[in-house]
Image: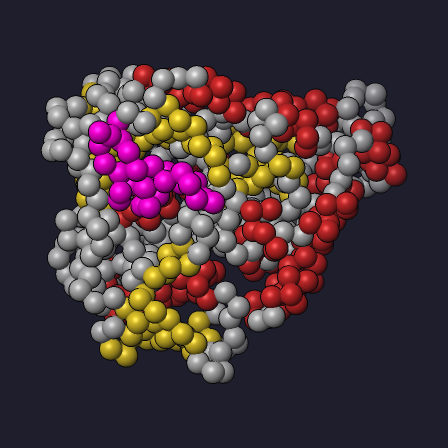
Amino acid sequence: MDRRNRATWLVTLGLLVAACGTGGDATTTATDDSGGTTTAPSTGEGGTVRIGWGGAPADLNPGIGVLTEDYTLYDLVYDSPINIDLDGNFQPELATEWSVSDDGLTWTMKIREGVSFSDGTPLTAEDVAYSINLYKDTEAFPLLPSYVTPFVAVEAPDATTVTLTTADPLPNFEYRMVAMYVLPKHIWETVDDPTAFTNDDMIGSGPFTLTEISQSEFVRLSPNPGYWGTVPTVDEVIFQTFDNPDGRVQALINGDVDMITEFPATAIANLQGADNVEVADGNYFGGRLADIFFNVVEPENCPTEEEGGICSGHPALRDVNVRQALATATDKQQLIDVVLLGTADPGLGLVTNSLGDWYPAELEAADYVFDIANANGILDAAGYADSDDDGIRECPAGAECGPTGDLTFRLNYPTDNDEHPRVSDMLSGWWNEIGVKVEIAGLDSDTLTSVCCPSFDFDVMLWSWTSDPDPESLLGVLLCSEISSGFSETGYCNPTVDELYAQQQIELDPAKRRELIVEISRIALEDVPYIIPWYYPRIQAYRTDTFAGWQVGQTILSLEDPSTLTVLRPAG
């Protein structure tokens, strides 16, 4: 599924005082807003695993979650019908098998027997069908409905069978089921408004249960003793938020945490030289990309006031010439070399190179080559001149030009991202050379989300996406229909793209479907609602002296995934 790696909550977290996570009387201490402390005790022989990350979950309700940290939590607490392993293969989870009818329109899943929710209530096919229908029918959910819109009927004819009927054949049924977190019908059917349900108890059937959460400080999970699979060995898992990346790295070196999910490339050498610390690399599920995107929503497509539309974007950004000039004045390789010390691959479009054959490598030759003179020439030809010689170009006569009357753009980025402050400064320098000024402001996740979409109250934004194992969903951000849903972050609308997207949704021939996806990517590259500076590698680090069992040998690296946290055991 799309795990939107969007900015997460800023916190002020005190120095964590902890044992090395091997059990006994270890405690975790975090400073709260009042200057006091919260204490999370660890007991038993399995030990407490402490994971440091830069963000925090924002929503416990799977329907409204958009952050990577949200989905990390959902994966640990809930089950889905189908899972994906660390080599990118689809595997049974709640669905033990699945098949499609001869006409390709009806999928049947057999649901595992003997599964219960963490409150002891049996889980049946009725819960699975209810959950999928809830995601499908709740249009205000920002992400999950897009996975199940092709299904015209989802039913549970008996306690172990779910049938899903489509109007057209599906080329990618399995990936649509990976994000269908199964919710307890007996709880959710009593909720009047599922978009307002806080879901504080998070009753699921996964390997862990939520024990405690202190927003933007820590999340504590315990093993689910009634889990149908192998119950985790550890006593608990605590995710601890460090907004300071250097503090996150030092906590691992000191043994205050056992693993960190992310850190600056500049810290790799320091971590590699630390005792009992290993640095691992691999891919993200589906890949992860950094993006620079523009507010291009046309006035006639602005969401209504009731939908949250503000649409204050600079009018000049709706001119493709301006966007192409900005892309030409962006040195992707320099960004990678300076910000990531050369560890990433240059980006191209929304389909990442981690997606194998789906990646449109043939379009690399059409990408924008860094050339300040050429970028200036594009703006000159489009009529943007610096008539008052102040270094900032004005719009052509008679054109809308925003509140400043020139090419001055607001540039926002998430404050919990380790790279974006430097990226913003470098973009500002290059774009200034072509007569464009940017006013840089880092924002916390709440504010950034509120100005992004569907309000479109920004000009230029930096963020990042973690993609699906299938290209369809992330390409969905280009659809006209997603402008008012909050899924589109640019307001881009091109009917040709919509038509091609609809065709690839039902094209069963992989080669023909790839041709459609490449054409969508080509149009997006030419229209430039996005600049994709790089595709991230996945780099994480862990201690070897506290726990054993970290899953580092597969194609995908995700040490906070159930695949690792369900098998960890104290070292020695």
- Please give left or right for residue 516 compared with residue 277 in the image: right
Residue furthest to the bottom: 102
Q: Is residue 436 above or below residue 158?
A: above
The scheme the figure's colours follow is secondary structure
Give the residue drawn at x 22%, y 74%. Answer: 159
Residue furthest to the front: 572
Give the residue drawn at x 18%, y 24%. Answer: 27
Q: Is residue 287 visible?
A: yes
> Is residue 551 inside the magenta stretch?
yes
> Is residue 136 inside the magenta stretch?
no
In the figure, residue 97 lies in which quadrant?
bottom left
> What range is drawn magenta here?
546-572
Name the magenta segment's main secondary structure.
loop
Q: Residue 560: x percent and y percent?
A: 35, 39
Instruction: Check the picture and name the quadrant holding the C terminus.
Output: top left
- Please give left or right for residue 139 compared with residue 265 in the image: left
Q: Is residue 459 visible?
A: no
In the figure, residue 248 lies in which quadrant?
top left
**Front-most of residues 267 and 310:** 267
Q: Is residue 223 above or below residue 434?
A: below
Q: Is residue 235 above or below residue 187?
A: above
**Front-most of residues 219 and 317:** 219
Give the residue drawn at x 40%, y 65%. Answer: 136
- Please give left or right for residue 347 compared with residue 27 in the image: right
